[in-house]
Image: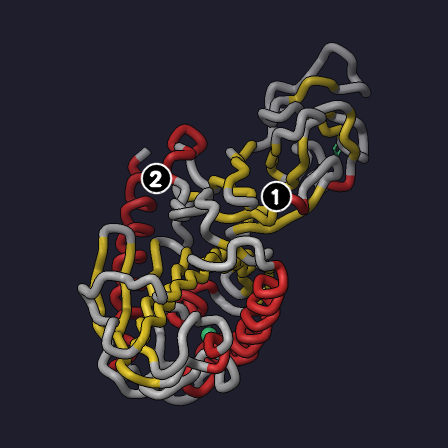
Amino acid sequence: MFLRNTWYVAGWSKDFGRELKAETFLGDEVVIYRKADGTPVALEDACPHRKLPLSDGTIEGDVVVCGYHGLTFDCSGSCVASPTQPGKIPSKAVVRSYPVVDRYRLLWIWMGDPALADPNKIFEVENFDNPDWGYTDGGVLDIDCNYLWIADNLLDPSHVAWVHLTSFAGAGTDDEPLDVERHDDGVIVSRWIYDKPASPYYKDLVKFDGNCDRLQHYQMDFPAIGLNKSVYTPAGTGGPNAPHTDKTYINISYNFMTPIDEDRSRYFWFQHRNTDPHDQAISEKMNAGARMAFEEDRRVLVAVHRGMKNKKTQNLDLGLDKGAKLFRLHLQRLIDQENTALAAE
Ligand code: FES
Ligand SMILES: [Fe+2]
């Protein structure tokens, strides 16, 4: 049901330390901790003896000791001690280990074949180290819905006109035509809206007065990363191939979804802008605004998940669903390919 050979966000790097943290990703129970030198470790969270979660045990040095009978596992998942029968470690005493990497303040986890886990395949955040760009602290939210409902939402520039009235809505967000484009790693739905006031969220952020040309660029990369780029530029200077001016304001909202299981998703985000790199007040204001908007999405998405799962009558699609349907189609192909390859092993 999920793409496994890919990097997902396991959490904010700062939230993992020298304690055993139990998590569930893609239906798998995982325990995460850091070695004494800070290196992150992720293991299957079930002792092979009686399946007590290893997260109920303790860390000793860099190894994990089961809290029931002391079977002890190193960072690769190998059993290194069996205190109730010294010197006789059962050959089957092993737990799965998952590759994990810290990058962009996030901890990334590879849920598939560890041999294929290449850190160079982690989604690239452009300009992350550019000192002229500022970013928000970001956040995390659990949403009781399948992650694909969030993906749909992040390929849908129109919903802002109804769901985000006090932030991202604005003239043209309801009915201007949308461009849908397939790119190598996913789908982009976008549109330019010309000569309109800035939306409430951006009104005090842009560095010019008067109307704007506005780009809504909604991009989803397989399997579950959304890049939402907003460009605001003085009216008359925007458009698909127009160069940026010194007044052009760019904000990119990065959205990382990790399925917990079929019915629950963990949603991480932060924002990255081409201005005010050190302005903490702006960062905090943007972060609070984004969190409020994502809470608005959460309410809708939980109800959509429930409604679609229990529908009593047929539902229908609208033109605005084109990008989301394209994304789901190609993602399903990738998942099918992965399953076919697994079955052939
Ligand atoms: S359940 Fe872990 S050692 Fe017995
Ligand atoms: Fe939204």
Q: Which residue is mark 1?
A: 13
Q: Residues within 10 Å of mark 2 (few under 14, many from 20)?
A: few
Kind of residue at badge 2: Leu
Residue 117 screen position, x and y as percent: 42, 33
Residue 309 screen position, x and y as percent: 47, 76
Residue drawn 28% across the image and 64% down it = 188
Residue drawn 27% across the image and 47% down it = 337
Q: Nearer the viewer, residue 317 or 103?
A: 103
Relative to residue 324, is residue 180 drawn left or right?
A: left
- Disc 1 Cβ-to-ligand 2 distance below 8 Å: no
Mark identifier at residue 288: none
Query: Residue 79, can we see it?
Result: yes
Q: Considering the numbered disc 1 on the image, is that residue within a helix, a strand or a loop?
A: helix
Q: Residues within 10 Å of mark 1 (few under 14, many from 20)?
A: some
Q: How is the image coloured?
A: secondary structure
Cα gap from disc 2 to disc 1, whole angstroms:
31 Å
Q: Quadrant of the C terminus?
A: top left
Q: Please say if 27 is above or below 238.
A: above
Kind of residue at badge 1: Ser
Q: Which residue is mark 2?
A: 342
Query: Residue 117, can we see it?
Result: no
Q: Considering the numbered disc 2 on the image, is that residue within a helix, a strand or a loop?
A: helix
Q: Quadrant of the N terminus?
A: bottom left
Q: Please say if 272 is above or below 124.
A: below
For marks 2 and 1 on the same chain, the one whose residue lies earlier in the sequence: 1
Picture quarter containing residue 284? bottom right
Please state which of the two labelled residues, at mark 2 or mark 1, is closer to the viewer.
1
Quarter, ligand 1? top right
Relative to residue 285, is residue 224 drawn left or right?
A: left
Residue 159 screen position, x and y as percent: 40, 81
Residue drawn 67% across the image and 46% down it = 15
